[in-house]
Image: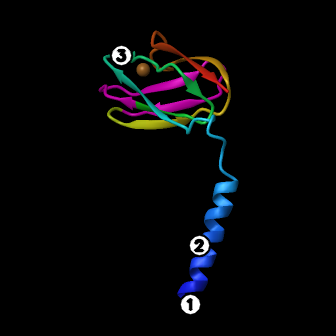
Amino acid sequence: MPARSTVVFAIAVLALSTSAVPASVPAPRTYTVIIDKMKFGPVPSGLRVGDKIRWINRDLFRHTATATNRSFEIDLLPATEGTLVLKRAGTVTFFCKFHPGMRGQLVVRR
Ligand SMILES: [Cu+2]
């Protein structure tokens, strides 16, 4: 039986390696945006479709990260965090719906 399971394993590895993504496509990354003192912290550059943004609310207030085109809304109670998966390329501005002066912009490439 050990010989047979080795063969099955080898076939599985082969299947994985032949369907592998080309080396030129970078693996998805997770970036962080920190909300503190009623402001969005710096938004990272180099965002790509498939990446994630972790929004961390360090404030004592509830905030949102709401896209002006409504493509996303992350609702963040005080001292919580939420994750957004970037699904589309483009430039999206966002704001906090409770504090409209809080704004930022994401630029996502394909
Ligand atoms: Cu807010």
Disc sitting over residue 1 in the figure: 1
Q: Is mark 1 within 8 Å of ligand 1?
A: no
Residue drawn 70% across the image and 53% down it: 19
Picture quarter with ligand 1: top left
In the image, which residues are magenta?
Answer: 56-77
Where residue 6 appears, x then y in whole percent? 57, 78
Q: If you read the primary sequence from the N terminus, does the residue marked by circle 3 or circle 1 appear first?
A: 1
Residue closer to the observer: 109 or 18? 18
- SS for dot 2: helix
Q: Observer-nearest residue: 13 or 82? A: 13
**Is 74 located above or below residue 6 in the figure?**
above
Measure the C-alpha gap from mark 3 to mark 1: 63 Å
State how far apart marks 3 and 2 are (Cα): 53 Å
- The label on residue 9 is 2
Q: Which mark is residue 33?
A: none
Which amino acid does the dot numbered 2 rest on?
Phe
The answer as to whether callout 3 falls within 8 Å of ligand 1 is: yes
Name the amino acid, label 3.
Met
Please state which amino acid type lies under the numbered disc 1: Met
Total numbered labels placed on residues in the image:
3
Tell whether label 1 touches label 2 (CB within 8 Å). Answer: no
Which of the numbered marks, if any, corresponds to residue 38? 3
**Is disc 3 surrounded by few (<14), some (14 to 19) or many (20+) residues within 10 Å?**
some
Query: Dividing the picture into quarters, in which one does residue 70 lie?
Result: top right
Mark 1 residue element: loop
Is 79 situated above or below 39?
A: below
Residue at (31% x, 17% y) in the render? 37
Say few, some or many: other residues with alpha carbon within 10 Å of mark 1 (under 14 / 14 to 19 / 20 or more). few
Residue 65 lies within the magenta run: yes
